[in-house]
Amino acid sequence: LRKIIFDTDPGQDDAIAILAALGSPELDVLGIVAVAGNVPLHLAAANARRIAELAGRGDIPVHAGAERPFLRPLVTAEHVHGETGLDGPDLPPPATALRDGHGVDFIVDTVRAHPPKSVTIAALGPLTNLALALLKAPDIAERLQGVVMMGGAYFEVGNVTPTAEFNVYVDPEAAASVFASGVDLTLLPLDATHGMHATPARIEAFRALGTRAGAAVAAMLSFSEVYDLQKFGWDGAPLHDPCVTAFLLRPELFEGRRVNVEVETGSPLTRGMTVVDYWGVTERPPNAFFVRSGDADGFFALLTERIARLA
Ligand code: BDR
Ligand code: CA
């Protein structure tokens, strides 16, 4: 059983990543920490509870984390995710309460309370919480089993500026700090996620499950289509954050290599760009496993199977 903490800004794709994990017997979700990103913190924290409750897991602790990035004003993405961050499915407001205590403390305390190398952070939003946790408690960098995050882009360039991916762009200083922390880091960048198109047939497979969770996932994916299809003209919108859950379950679905990744924080033009030394042309030591591609059919089959297991 792999123990994970989600650090997230839900977000339809965050929601599907969390639901798939809750439908996976190999994963033990210790808690969910919300961060400001796609929507402001209070909405992200409410959405995290709505998702846990949809899966019948209102018992999972949900904590609120950072309200804004280290230095920059918060940039949100309601134009992609809707006003609530979770537009599409008809989910009730949360019935459960947020847990007391800051999300950053939850991360630190939980990692310290478990044996070394037994807890993984699944990061699906800006890295503000994780950077704060690693600054507050540098010992957890060694103690964590690893961090598997959706973020960054290189060959596939950016989705919020020409060169930056949203999660890194929103808090580039936090991302730079995490990348320099020495933690065992895996990146699922746009290079991997842009191949995962939620085609009409793949969406239909979720709806055909005939369950509440299946219907909710189909509604979330249908909502996301609108923005991306207008923008990219693909056969389906790319599905980002569930790549993290899929990587935790079936890493063999993905291909990548260990490389050095640095974040641009200075230039107004390329702020938030992840500069990947893919061809090893510098002496900079590798600090991340950079996933470049994945098996889209295997990915969607896995997600559908896991969503099917939710009651
Ligand atoms: C990332 O940005 C957010 O809008 C998504 O939830 C995902 O985490 C993709 O760039
Ligand atoms: Ca996200």
Image (cartoon, rainbow, N blue to C red):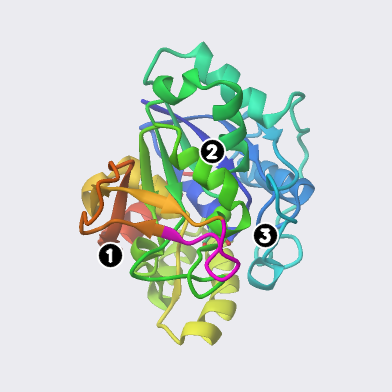
- Around disc 3, counting alpha carbons within 10 Å, would you say few (fewer than 14), some (14 to 19), or many (20 or more)? many
Circle number at residue 86: 3
Q: Is residue 22 visible?
A: no
Bounds of the magenta span? 266-274
Q: Earlier in the sequence, mark 1 or mark 2?
A: 2
Q: Is residue 268 magenta?
A: yes
- Tell whether 114 sits left or right of 99: left
The percent position of residue 248, horizontal first and vertical second, equals: 35, 41
Residue 103 visible to the viewer: yes
**Badge 2, how many Cα within 10 Å: few under 14, some, many 20+?**
many
Q: Is residue 245 left or right of residue 285?
A: right
Q: Amino acid at mark 2?
A: Phe
How much space separates mark 1 and mark 2, taking CA atoms? 25 Å
Number of residue marks: 3
Towards the viewer: 53 or 103: 103
Q: Which residue lies under the disc numbered 1? A: 297
> Label 3 is placed on what type of residue?
Leu
Residue at 32% across, 58% down: 299
Q: Which callout, 2 or 3, points at the residue further toward the start of the chain? A: 2
Residue at x 36%, y 44% (from the top left corner): 186
Lower position in the chain sequence, tag 1 or tag 3: 3
From the top left corner, tell me how far across and down residue 128 is, in percent: 62, 42
Nearer to us of marks 2 and 3 is 2
Residue under circle 2? 6
Q: Position of residue 149 (x, y in %)?
A: 44, 46
Residue at 49%, 39% in the rendered image: 178
Residue 206 colored magenta? Answer: no
Which secondary structure lies at badge 2?
Answer: strand
At mark 3, the secondary structure is: loop
Task: Describe residue 298's horizontal placement relative to residue 80 as left or right.
Answer: left
* SS category of the residue bearing label 1: helix
Mark 1 or mark 2, whichever is nearer to me: 2
